[in-house]
Image: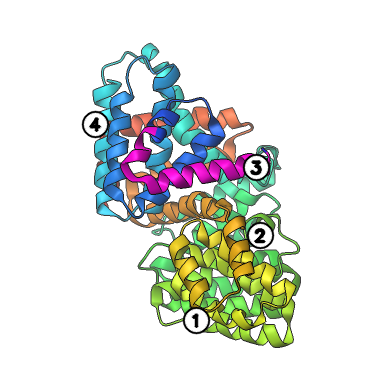
Amino acid sequence: MSDAKQESRRTAFKAAYLMGDQGRELFIWLAGQDLPAARRAAVLSLYLRWRRDRPFVFGLLDDLARDVGLPPFGRRGRVLRFLGDLSITIYINHPDDDEVIRRTSLLWRRVLRGRLRLHRLLFLMRGPILGHIQAIISARTLRTAVLAEIQDPDALFHQSAEARERFLRIVPLVDPGEKVGTDAQRADVAALLESEILIHRVLAALVIAIHAVRDPERMRRFVDDLWRQVGAQGRMWSTLAYAVPLPGTPEAWVEQLEGMTRRLIEEHRATFLGQDDPLLARFDIVLLPLGLAYGKRGGGMPLFQELLERGLHEDPPVAVRVIRGLAAVGVYYPHAVFEVLRVCADDLDRPETAEAFVDAMAAMRALHFDAVDLFLQQVGVPDAIRDRVSKQETSQLVSRCVHWIGYYSNAVHEGLNYPIMRKALLIDALESLGRARRASDFTRAHTPTLLNLLEATDFELIRWTKRDA
């Protein structure tokens, strides 16, 4: 798609985002259209709208649910998928929110029982509906889990037998009740962290994160031992494991992540600068773990402040890296990031500093446009820089945070808190991925698990969240 078309689409959805009830008809119309890229953009726009106006988006979801019906073909099928994409996007980013849990459960009981009558249909008549469920949940899970935008899924499907067995050995450790700490487990996790297959690294990160919430000191020692076994990539990915926006993570993570981040900079400069990792080249989250820990604790971001101030005077590449890396942190904690970046205002005559600053502000502005504009005005940023920020604004970083970090954080939450979802959604999905030889193997294996769970809980998703099940 051309830059002009992308800019036009962004402008149209931002206008709808700001229009209030007048923008409702655009989204309802688009939900039924066969325009995949536009529908994805609309889902992101509506999620961002939901963050400041829940009643509007919840009402729109209810309106869309009334458009779903039998047979689920054509427009009705597309509305069903749009409804699924939007409700899942909201849920995975706020799985601890009681209102989100309740509204999501009510919505899908109404759709699956009331509109599609899935509980009454004979097996052979369920096919079209199951196809949509497969596309909404299983296929989306697959695309996200294997990071399909960055790596060919065949890297997973064609893995060696040894790698497959290692992956499957570690899957049960996403249960916080499992013990983690043996030499064999540490060797497996180390190998996964340094694997060329990205979902292997994600699984290792999940194990670290889940157990680091439940027992932070024990997992700190485990990670310290890991760092003696792994190189730069393993150390980076064990740090990224802590990129969990959920509230309530241990405050002890702050000191640990300060040490890990500092060591990455000092001992693995090329990796920190983003020169040797395909994920970080596309999705810069190098500072996100510590940034999230700082944001939840409150009281400033001292290591970032130190690195930036020293870097601007002594080490410009590190300063530029910090500025760019703070964009992802700013998606979640914009005002804390503004405080760190104030020092840049006097250094914007340097082209490299100005370019990094514009990139960071433009990425944050997609979500926090009023706050970014006010900050730029308060610190006296030149008009030329402010114009560049406005013209360059992009939703790409926000979109990846919403989808990739949202899925990852939700998986951590499921693993920690919901036994039913841990077994049926997290462990089953990971085991199905580990065994799959092609994409269809995963969707065929995982979709029946979802249907069985729906039927066993009478289509009430809220029952999936029982902590004592």
Give the vertical position of 90 relative to 310 (above or below). above
Residue assigned mark 3: 4
Residue 20 painted magenta: yes
Q: CA distance from mark 3 to mark 2?
A: 26 Å
Mark 1 surroundings: few (<14), some (14-19) or many (≥20) residues within 10 A: few
Q: Which residue is mark 1?
A: 255
For the point 36% across and 33% down, which residue is it?
Answer: 25
Give left or right: position of 418 versus 435: left
How far is mark 3 from mark 1, CA to CA?
45 Å
Q: Amino acid at mark 3?
A: Ala
- Which comes before the other along the chain, label 4 or label 1? 1
Q: Position of residue 267 (x, y in %)?
A: 72, 78
Percent of width and height locating residue 89: 42, 45
For label 2, the residue is: 280
Q: Magenta stretch?
A: 2-25
Q: Secondary structure at mark 4?
A: loop
Q: Is residue 38 left or right of residue 272?
A: left
Q: Tell which tag, 3 or 4, sits nearer the viewer.
A: 3
